[in-house]
Amino acid sequence: MLLVPFRKEEEAAAAVSSIFTAGIVPSALEFMEREAIEWTCRYMNLEVPMAADERAHLLIELDGNDMDLLYKDAERVYEVLETFDVGDILVADTEKQKEDLWRLRRNVGHAVKSNSIYKEEDTVVPRAELPTLLRGVKEIGARYHFKSVCYGHAGDGNLHINIVKADMSDDDWNNKLPEGIKEIFRLCVSLGGTISGEHGIGLVQRPYIGIALSEVQLRLMQGIKQLFDPKGILNPGKIF
């Protein structure tokens, strides 16, 4: 397992696609912005060394049955990373180190929640578009005056965007923020992605479903629902 610091968030996002393009398929590849790690370290009382200029990290896990092949894969990952502006790479070679890093990653959402009221938007785009998505999220946030902490399953093109209320007014949070979220989802769709990577639609994403699906698609789905559930007793009121 490798924890790789980058001096630019977009370079961390770009490295994801480069690793796969090089023919390496990690068992896990996670993206975390600096604040995601800082907040979680405080929340979990963990220590992760970070230089002042490091802005994001990739958590890269390799697995297999042959240690020689694993080391070769690690060397190939290093070769890819040499083309980016990275800091000192932490190699977790003990079970405790690996477990601590996974505990860190698994608790990012809890740490963000402990800091502020927040909304988590679950986005997904092709891996090569992750830098554009990340840059776009920050630009949209600047326009709508919201702060975001991003992390996610970057190997799948999945980015969790945690929007924190912090000092936003209730009016902006309730009335202006949904427009910003719509812009984020429109950006995802324009990049070949969609409005949910793993959380599904349900009640939370329901207002935005028209961004990803056309009226024709929605009517077809509604027709299928009506065919198999004419009395509307299966999961009533959720989408249709």
Image (cartoon, helix red, strand yellow):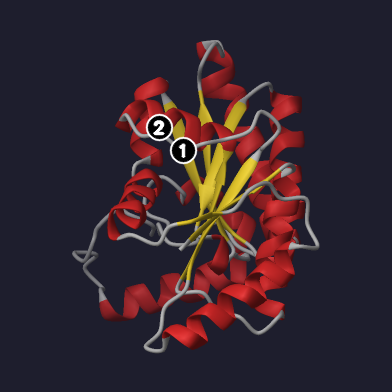
Give the number of the mark in front: 2 or 1.
1
Question: Which SS class for mark 1?
Answer: loop
Q: Residue at x 65, y 84 (%)?
A: 23
Q: What is the x, y in percent for residue 148?
A: 59, 32
Cα gap from disc 2 to disc 1, whole angstroms: 7 Å
Residue 72 falls in image quadrant = bottom right
Sequence-wise, the earlier of marks 2 and 1 is 2
Q: What residue did someone put label 2 on?
A: 41
* Relative vertical location of residue 18 with respect to residue 118 in this rendering, above or below: below
Q: In what quadrant of the picture does the C terminus appear?
A: bottom left
Question: Which SS class for mark 2?
Answer: helix
**Res 192 visible:** no
**Res 177 visible:** yes
Left or right, 97 with reference to 140: left
Given residues 220 and 32, the one toward you in this image is 32
* Relative vertical location of residue 107 with respect to residue 190 in this rendering, above or below: above
Residue 43 falls in image quadrant = top left
Q: What residue did someone put label 1 on?
A: 48
Q: What is the x, y in percent for residue 15?
A: 70, 62
Q: Residues within 10 Å of mark 1 (few under 14, many from 20)?
A: few
Question: What's the amino acid at mark 1?
Answer: Val
Total numbered labels placed on residues in the image: 2
Given residues 36 and 164, the one toward you in this image is 36
Question: What's the amino acid at mark 2?
Answer: Cys
* Relative vertical location of residue 162 with respect to residue 17 in this rendering, above or below: above
Left or right, 190 with reference to 196: right
